[in-house]
């Protein structure tokens, strides 16, 4: 599928035709670095001074490149499609080759960075439990009431919190049964067929 | 195959794999390594320099050192958890492939520190809202804005407990009249009598 670039985007990338390919290579490297670690405005000013253009133009050029790379990596478009999409910008053949190189080399890494941006639910860290028997309370003596108390430790984006839960043995057995039923679903024909097709 | 020291379950695969790593060092060095691991389990601090020196002869890499400490921690704490006697542990470890001299060394260390390990595990069992401190103060109210002569003793109690879900200390302050306090004291004494009867 082809990448559709907005007019504003084309305008920003138009700046790249005015500089030589070595500079475009440098911009490409800066764009990938920014995708990895976040942008640094001082670099725009340094480059702008050297090329004698306003810093804003440099910024738009680099950001345009970043957007081009992320969109292409996100959609995982093929070489042919990338070349066709870039053709629309009217760059020289050499520039097109450069951009294609940049895309192919960094595609995997950019995809990995993008995958970390999805929202995540808190996940399991640790479970402490204990089995108690209540023998008496202020209101009633001579009881026998077993309970299981659990402290579930969860971790979410580096922050840990804990939840205290309590249940009687019958509910606990039911819980275990339901969870094992969930695990057994993986072995059903339906799931096996889907997993085989995802590879 | 079910093992008592694993709680009558199968032995985990990684334990089986690392037992062969343990067999690479001499039995004397392994006994010294056991002593270090037990110190770590009892929170007495582990001397990593000593451990590195012990394992340097067998040319253990960092990964191997970590693995051997992990497998020894698992075996010792798991055996203490399920209250396995030294002889059964010895026969089970030999079944898993640990050489006889190594097993004898390990079991001797285990037997020496068996009760200390169980004490430590008992202390670190799940307990919600541990009471950390109690302080009290008895006041005598002479007069108030509502009544000119009050002449009543009151007690103020400050309870410091660890929060159930958070790990911070929570302070609760209560004040009560002499009668209310008498009721509280009687009920608590009844609970104490019941606890002593169970001991």
Image (cartoon, coloured by chain):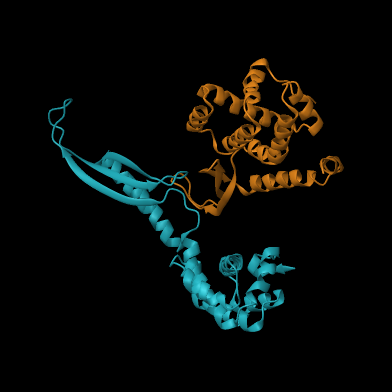
Q: Residue, x 67% and y 19% (percent of image)? A: A10
Where, by quadrant of the figure, is residue A51 drawn? top right
Give the camera-side residue of B134 and B68.
B68
Looking at the image, is B148 positioned above or below residue B84? above
Tell me where residue A111 appears, x and y as whole percent: 68, 37
Looking at the image, residue B192 sits to the left or right of residue A144; the answer is: left
Give the camera-side residue of B173 and B104.
B104
Where, by quadrant of the figure, is residue B172 drawn? top left
Tell me where residue B121 appears, x and y as whole percent: 50, 63
In the picture, the quarter occupied by the N terminus of chain B is: bottom right
Give the camera-side residue of B79 and A33.
A33
Looking at the image, is B82 positioned above or below residue B154? below
How many dots with numbers?
0
Q: Residue, x 65% and y 47% (percent of image)? A: A170
Looking at the image, is A88 positioned above or below residue B169? above
Looking at the image, residue B176 sits to the left or right of residue B22; the answer is: left
Q: Residue, x 40% and y 53% (percent of image)? A: B191
Looking at the image, residue A2 sits to the left or right of residue A129; the answer is: right
Tell me where residue B169 appears, x and y as whole percent: 37, 46
In the picture, the quarter occupied by the C terminus of chain B is: bottom left
Give the colour in which the image draws chain B.
cyan
Residue A120 seen: no
Q: Residue, x 16% and y 40% (percent of image)? A: B140
Tell me where residue B170 appears, x and y as whole percent: 37, 43
Chain shown orange: that is: A
């Amino acid at each position: 599928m082809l990448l559709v670039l907005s007019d504003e985007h084309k305008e920003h990338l138009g700046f790249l035709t005015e500089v030589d390919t070595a500079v475009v290579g440098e911009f490409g490297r800066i764009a990938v670095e920014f995708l990895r670690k976040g942008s640094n405005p001082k670099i725009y000013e340094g480059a702008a001074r050297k090329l004698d253009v306003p810093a804003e133009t440099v910024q738009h050029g680099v950001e345009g490149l970043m957007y081009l790379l992320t969109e292409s990596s996100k959609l995982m478009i093929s070489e042919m499609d990338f070349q066709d999409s870039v053709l629309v910008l009217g760059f020289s053949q050499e520039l097109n080759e450069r951009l294609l190189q940049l895309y192919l080399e960094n595609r995997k890494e950019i995809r990995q960075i993008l995958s970390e941006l999805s929202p995540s639910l808190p996940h399991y860290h640790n479970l402490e439990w204990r089995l108690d028997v209540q023998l008496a309370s202020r209101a009633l003596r001579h009881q026998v009431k077993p309970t299981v108390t659990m402290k579930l430790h969860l971790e979410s984006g580096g922050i840990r919190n804990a939840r205290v839960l309590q249940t009687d043995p019958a509910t606990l057995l039911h819980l275990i049964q339901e969870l094992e039923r969930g695990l057994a679903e993986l072995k059903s024909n339906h799931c096996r067929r889907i997993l085989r097709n995802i590879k | 195959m079910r093992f008592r020291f694993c709680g009558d379950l199968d032995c985990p695969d990684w334990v089986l794999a690392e037992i062969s790593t343990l067999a690479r060092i001499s039995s004397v060095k392994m006994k010294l390594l056991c002593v270090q691991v037990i110190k770590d389990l009892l929170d007495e601090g582990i001397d990593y320099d000593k451990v590195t020196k012990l394992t340097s002869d067998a040319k253990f890499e960092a990964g191997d050192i970590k693995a051997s400490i992990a497998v020894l921690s698992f075996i010792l704490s798991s055996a203490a958890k399920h209250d396995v006697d030294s002889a059964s542990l010895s026969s089970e470890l030999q079944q898993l492939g640990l050489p006889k001299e190594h097993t004898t060394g390990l079991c001797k260390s285990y037997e020496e520190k068996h009760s200390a390990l169980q004490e430590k595990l008992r202390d670190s069992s799940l307990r919600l809202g541990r009471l950390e401190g109690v302080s009290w103060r008895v006041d005598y109210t002479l007069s108030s804005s509502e009544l000119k002569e009050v002449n009543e003793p009151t007690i103020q109690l400050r309870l410091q407990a660890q929060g159930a879900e958070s790990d911070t200390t929570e302070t609760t302050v209560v004040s009560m009249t002499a009668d209310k306090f008498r009721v509280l004291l009687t009920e608590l004494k009844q609970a104490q009598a019941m606890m002593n009867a169970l001991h």
